[in-house]
């Protein structure tokens, strides 16, 4: 098995890492202190530099202005972008827009693509994905209350969503709604595009998370849909295909998340090592001389490398056989890599001491905002169950 990275891919990865370190890292100090909207003028300047260097939307096919990277290539690029919380945004590869781009490319009509996808690819607008509900468990995506009822040439939507990421300032939402409550569970829901200026679309609040409500792209919103009427032509794909479309988005999306988490882990390990090697704990003694610190560094290095190999294997399997055949691998990496990331972040904070819990480094941001990795897109416990059921099935035992 060849573990080498093709020269062309290595060159691209190195270019992106250099850009992130020289152009993006310097923005982080401001990012910790001001609202996201205040940073947008600077971020737009960086986005223009990305366009000029031909690195815009790396995950999108060349036919639509992207780099046309496969899963393996994009995984390696995503790792570099994730070394800063602003990396993916500056390259127009950020969630939830990246996922909405993918489903609009695959399931959108020509009219939908012209109206919604084209400006999204250009970075002229943002979007959100509205699925999770406060009254229903997010781990059960076939059990929802938000309804869309057909009324002539329209759908009328009523329901309550929350943790709709980046809804603040978004131009449209892709909303998961029940269109046929009597159908079998996986065929009850559909996805409908809802412009956020539609009467009845009500952004209630940005939800404070560990003391920070955020704003604009860097936020999670609670939304009410109250007699929200949209044209039936805004239906994405076929009626009843909402769950299938969501799965086509979430499976590959978990690969993207995992490589992002590996990038975060690498950044935190780097900061951990720099601090340990430079921090004096006594005359002539560095923090790195302590065995417990060395063990934390060794464990972090080993766990990150193992995570990367697992994710690249899952990406390779998707490239070769499709997302459906890689479901076990995707569930494995979803909970394993999230756990590794949190352990590495925690060790890095511990090595930094009081500095680590302050906002003077990026570590506190990672700690606050990445804990959710073990919850969203399926909590750890659900993915462990998925893996266990499939492994036991191979041994002739069914858990159902």
Image: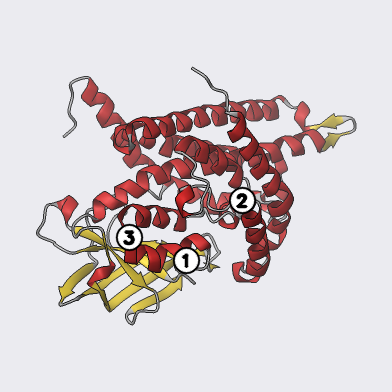
How far is the residue under mark 1 from the one under mark 2? 18 Å
How far is the residue under mark 3 from the one under mark 2? 33 Å
Front-most of 154 and 143? 154
At label 3, counting other C-alpha atoms closer than 10 Å, the crowd grade (few under 14, some 14-19, many 20 or more) is many
Residue in view at x 59 percent, y 47 percent: 81
Residue in view at x 26 percent, y 29 percent: 390
Specify whether 263 is left or right of 171. right
Q: Under tag 2, what secondary structure?
A: loop
Q: Does 27 appear above or below 20?
A: below
> Residue at the left extreme?
182
Per the image, the residue denoted by label 2 is: 54
Front-most of 182 and 369? 182
How far is the residue under mark 3 from the one under mark 1? 23 Å
Q: Are marks 3 and 2 in contact (CB under 8 Å)?
A: no
Q: Under tag 3, what secondary structure?
A: loop
Specify whether 361 is left or right of 87. right
Judge whether residue 60 can be spotted in this image: no
Q: Under tag 1, what secondary structure?
A: helix
Residue in view at x 61 percent, y 51 percent: 54
Specify whether 377 is left or right of 338. left
Where residue 127 sits, quadrant-wise, is: bottom left
Q: Does 294 appear above or below 55?
A: above
Q: Are marks 3 and 1 in contact (CB under 8 Å)?
A: no
Specify whether 31 is left or right of 115. right
Judge whether residue 90 can be spotted in this image: yes
The mark closer to the camera, 3 or 2, is 2
Label whose residue precedes the other's in the sequence (3 or 1) = 1
Residue in view at x 52 percent, y 62 percent: 122
Per the image, the residue denoted by label 3 is: 131
Label whose residue precedes the other's in the sequence (3 or 2) = 2
Q: Are marks 1 and 2 in contact (CB under 8 Å)?
A: no
Per the image, the residue denoted by label 1 is: 119
């Amino acid at each position: 098995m060849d573990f080498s990275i093709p020269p062309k891919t290595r060159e691209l990865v190195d270019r992106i890492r250099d850009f992130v370190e020289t152009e993006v890292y310097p923005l982080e100090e401001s990012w910790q202190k001001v609202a996201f909207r205040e940073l947008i003028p600077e971020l737009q300047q960086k986005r223009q530099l990305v366009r000029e260097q031909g690195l815009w939307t790396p995950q999108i096919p060349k036919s639509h202005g992207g780099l046309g990277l496969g899963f393996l290539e994009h995984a390696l690029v995503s790792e570099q972008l994730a070394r800063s919380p602003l990396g993916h945004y500056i390259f127009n590869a950020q969630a939830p827009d990246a996922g909405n781009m993918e489903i609009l490319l695959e399931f959108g009509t020509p009219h939908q693509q012209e109206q919604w996808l084209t400006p999204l690819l250009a970075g002229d607008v943002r979007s959100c994905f509205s699925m999770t509900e406060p009254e229903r468990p997010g781990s059960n995506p076939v059990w929802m209350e938000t309804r869309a009822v057909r009324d002539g040439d329209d759908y009328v939507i009523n329901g309550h969503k929350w943790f709709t990421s980046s809804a603040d300032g978004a131009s449209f939402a892709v909303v998961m709604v029940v269109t046929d409550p009597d159908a079998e569970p996986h065929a009850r829901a559909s996805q409908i595009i809802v412009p956020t200026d539609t009467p009845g679309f009500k952004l209630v609040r940005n939800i404070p998370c560990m003391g920070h409500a955020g704003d604009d792209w860097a936020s999670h919103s609670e939304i009410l849909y109250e007699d929200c009427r949209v044209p039936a032509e805004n239906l994405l794909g076929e009626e009843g295909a909402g769950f299938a479309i969501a799965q086509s988005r979430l499976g590959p999306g978990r690969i993207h998340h995992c490589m992002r988490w590996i990038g975060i882990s690498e950044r935190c390990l780097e900061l951990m090592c720099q601090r340990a090697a430079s921090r004096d704990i006594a005359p002539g003694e560095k923090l790195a001389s302590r065995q417990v610190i060395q063990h934390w560094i060794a464990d972090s290095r080993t766990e990150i490398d193992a995570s990367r190999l697992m994710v690249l294997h899952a990406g390779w399997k998707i490239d070769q056989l499709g997302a459906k055949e890689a479901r076990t691998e995707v569930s494995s990496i979803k909970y394993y890599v999230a756990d590794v990331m949190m352990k590495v972040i925690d060790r890095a904070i511990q090595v930094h001491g009081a500095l680590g819990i302050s906002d003077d480094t990026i570590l506190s941001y990672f700690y606050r905002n990445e804990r959710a990795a073990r919850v969203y897109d399926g909590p750890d416990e659900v993915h462990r169950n998925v893996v266990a059921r499939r492994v036991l099935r191979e041994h002739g035992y069914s858990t159902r």
